[in-house]
Image (cartoon, rainbow, N blue to C red):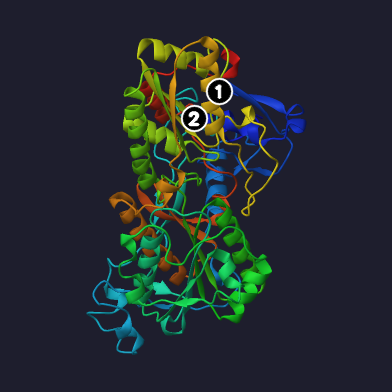
Amino acid sequence: MASVSSMNNACLSNLSAHVPMSNRDQHRQLYYGNLRFKWMGRHSSRKIRFSACRIVAEKLDIDFSDPDWKTEYQKDFENTFNLPHLKDVLDVKPRPSTFSLMHRDGSRWLRNENVTDRAEGPEDRKNDYVDIDDRTLLKVIKYASPTSAGAECIDPNCTWVEQWVHRAGPRKEIYFEPTKVKAAIVTCGGLCPGLNDVIRQIFFTLERYGVQKIFGVRYGFRGFFDPELPMKKLSREHVQDINLEGGSLLGTSRGGASTSDIVDSIEAKEIDMVFILGGNGTHAGANAIHNECRKRKMKVSVICVPKTIDNDILLMDKTFGFDTAVEAAQRAINSAYIEAHSAYHGIGLVKLMGRSSGFIAMHASLASGQVDICLIPEVPFTLDGPNGVLSHLEHLIRTKGAAVVCVAEGAGQELLAAPDLKDLSGNAVLGDIGVHFKNQIKSYFNEKGIHADVKYIDPTYMVRSVRANASDAILCTVLGQNAVHGAFAGYSGITMGICNTHYVFLPITEVIHTPRAVNPNSRMWHRCLTSTGQPDFSPRNC
């Protein structure tokens, strides 16, 4: 039996960082292409969650000599990505949808007019709805071999396996009576361009279904339990123009009360739908709320909308706020370029957000075309030595007379004596790589007796607090609408996403295993390296 874990090159290059060192040495070694790593013994039956993978739940042992392995794998995948539904734990009956593209709102259906009218009944509006059995492919590239750039393979032959996920959109049948629905919207974590756009579209879509009781929970999960923060009743006047501004109409915060306290509040306030906007930590919190509601057999739909400028949520093409953040980062990079090239031996250093994923730094570097060095968390580097970053900076100064460096905030943390602290969301408090790098550059050139004029720019809060650009505004609009469609369809414990340009519903459990990361073997990172022209700074070469 060929016992090989389902994996891909992206998994292999990043997974070891997530396995405790004390365990790594006991694991057998597997090879894919020119990569190798150690993993659990072959007889384990646990499911493994891979980092940086688009396949996120695999069986450890697959007998590839079995002619039916592919069918069994697809069945397992389908079961894993099955969407949690209210009818899993409750005896709920569907009713015809009140959502119609033919009317201003659902009021006509709510007045109990003839909903089976031939011209207006849901059963005759064939193209208004998405069939519950519609699926979209999670992956669309068939790789020829595991050594192909960015390859994602399940077996050593890189067999093509179809992986279908649920298409998002309005369903013909719904599981709530709109006139009785009380909906709540909450924004958690840090600010992100597009929060107001999503709030606005959730409100408008709820209104179109016929919901009249729509509330905003203020300042994140805190608003569920803080008596000084009563929920805010929302109206069209409140939300009409909020997309013209950055930030969040409702306010946001990190951390919050216990899951039990939050669900107690949801129950006491008789909330039927909870729409939660946030990143990885918020998704984990939302999943806990969903599970507690199911445990109590409450008819509550908990729906997430993925929000992070870091673009670090698994399986999704991108999250809202990312495009705007990259665009805003351009202004910082352009300023660094001008500063560097306006000074004798000028060095422009820009630190961008990206705790564990370097998507902003990579895409901003690609978009600008002005960056000479891009450093991200996924790719180890050394500052010192003949092949280190500082040596290359010296080469750039001697040959070009100036240089621009872009570094993600989570890059090079192993070079810092970072405090062992956690923020309110449970994230490790990072050391400041930007300040450290700036000081190292100055010391290096001083010791060499070479003049260097270093300009350091940290645009963190400017990047995330701006208004959403056109691309993100469209994404926010569709995600907000689909969040409401998912809730009325009776789903709970799901999140919205865009996969291969199609909008999908995904179980929250499948996107919270680990942050999505840049694959150092991907074509996109290779493109970034081609653009910057930087060499390999990895410690093994120094």
Q: Is residue 297 visible?
A: no
Along the line of sight, the residue nearer the viewer: 69 or 16: 16
| Residue type, numbered disc 2 | Cys
Q: In the structure shown, which secondary structural element does the residue marked by tag 1 occupy?
A: helix
Q: Do we see residue 252 in this rendering?
A: yes
Q: Quadrant of the C terminus?
A: top right
Residue 337 location (% of width, % of height): 34, 28
Q: CA distance from mark 1 to mark 2?
A: 44 Å
Indicate whether 437 appears above or below 393.
below
For disc 2, the marked residue is 158
Label 1 neighbour load within 10 Å: few <14, some 14-19, many 20+ = some
Query: Can you say whether 403 is above or below 69 in the image?
Result: above
Residue 93, which numbered label?
none
| Left or right of 365 in this view: 411 | right
User: Nearer the viewer's eye, disc 1 or disc 2?
Assistant: 1
Please state which of residues 339 and 138 is positioned toward the viewer in this rendering: 339
Residue 263: percent from left, percent from top: 63, 72
Residue 333 vertical position relative to residue 195 in the rendered view, above or below: above
Place of residue 429 in the rendered image (x, y in percent of width and height, measured from the top left): 63, 43
Q: Secondary structure at mark 2?
A: loop
Assign the N terminus to one quadrant of the image.
Answer: top right
Residue at the image point whose x is 36% and y is 73% from the top: 238
Nearest the eye: 276 or 390: 390
Q: Going from the N terminus, do you reach mark 1 or mark 2 first?
A: 2
Instruction: Residue under label 1, please give it.
Output: 440
Q: Residue type at mark 1?
A: Gln
Residue 427: x %, y % from top left = 62, 47
Residue at 54%, 64% (x, y): give it.
220
